[in-house]
Amino acid sequence: MARISADELLARLEKGKPIPAILLLGEEPYLRDSCRTLLIERYVPEAARLWAVSRYSADRGEMQAALEQAQTMAMLSPLQVVFLEEAEAMESLGEKNRDEAVKLLTAYLENPAPFTVLVIEATQLDQRMKWGKLLIEKALVVECGLGENLNERQAAAVALARAMAKEQGVEFQRGAAEDLAEFVAADLMRLKTEIDKLATYAAGRKQIRREDVGALVVSAQTTTVWELADMLASRQGKKALEFLDRLLREGEEPLQMLGAITWMYRKLIEASEVRGVTNGWQAARALGMRPEQAELALQSARKIPKARLLGGLGALQRADDRLKSGREDARAVMEFLVTELTGEATMAAQG
């Protein structure tokens, strides 16, 4: 069946009859949650949602129960929505059980209940296997991810940030949405939380400025980020690794740390291009940062050649790809990144 983006789902639902089977495919919780809400609001009256919305998990072995519910009419509503989450868990079953699951789902999809919208969710599927191939072919696939490419994810997050802000009655100053998307590492759930906070802060003037992002969002990790910047600038590899170990033990998320470091590197590149600035207040206007942050950016930028900064962005992109793949140990990826950024590998890679 067709593939559409999460943004296109509403238009598709308005075209005609309920869709028998929908596959929400992708790793982005915010997009999946938005699709769930849209489907429930579209098909089930609010008063009937206690009876006409049900959730099952393939990881808990509830696939058959979900299909049985799909064939049972719900109370007080002409339509029901049945969610089957974690569908990728079926791929780890033994071959016999997996084939039985494919058989059951195939039988249902050949004669779906007219009063049910079956919504299957998976972060990713192996389309070479029968289970994944069946879902891709027989369900409407709604892409709930931002893609694998860092630049594409950032661009999508920026577009969504602007749309979220518009819903709140505010808009972003030029560059502010980009700063926010980079700092939260295109994590849309966190993006929404930060925009809610920023919109309240900026409500009087109806505009979220770059300095607002710096003050309200970046301030929580400013000390951490610029402490690390100084270690990277002076190539203190051992100290930087010990610092990383402490942050991980304290519960910092590798992906958010990576987003903060990427944001820092872009600010360092901006700072390296600033001319005629002698203090933090002047730098703050040029960089859209608070004065103390801007001063630290200028100091660190003077210690790291621009070619090394650009090479560092390449290393950050590779680390982002490796973390998002989910196939490697996150700690190992971050340790290798710090080694790259403090060693000669970054210069060699960009040269």
Image (cartoon, rainbow, N blue to C red):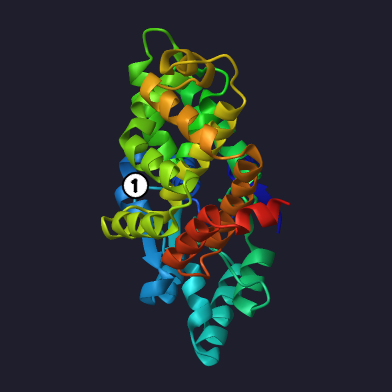
Please report the residue visible at 28 percent of the width from the left and 60 percent of the height from the top.
Answer: 249
Residue that carries the numbered disc 1 in the rendered image: 49
Task: Identify which amino acid the numbered label 1 is placed on.
Answer: Arg
Answer with left or right where residue 271 lies relative to residue 187.
Answer: right
Rendered view: 265 above or below 339: above
Please report the residue visible at 46 percent of the width from the left and 67 percent of the height from the top.
Answer: 332
Answer with left or right where residue 285 lies relative to residue 200.
Answer: right
Q: Is residue 156 visible?
A: yes
Find residue 210 and report its horizontal and vertical position in percent.
47, 21
Rendered view: 183 above or below 340: above
Quadrant for the N terminus in the image: bottom right
Find residue 280 and report its horizontal and vertical position in percent.
42, 18
Rendered view: 53 above or below 111: above
Q: Is residue 160 visible?
A: no
Q: Nearer the viewer, residue 287 or 123?
A: 287
In what element is the residue under mark 1?
helix
Q: Nearer the viewer, residue 149 or 47?
A: 149
As drawn, the residue found furthest toward the top would be 205
**Quadrant of the image occupied by residue 344:** bottom right
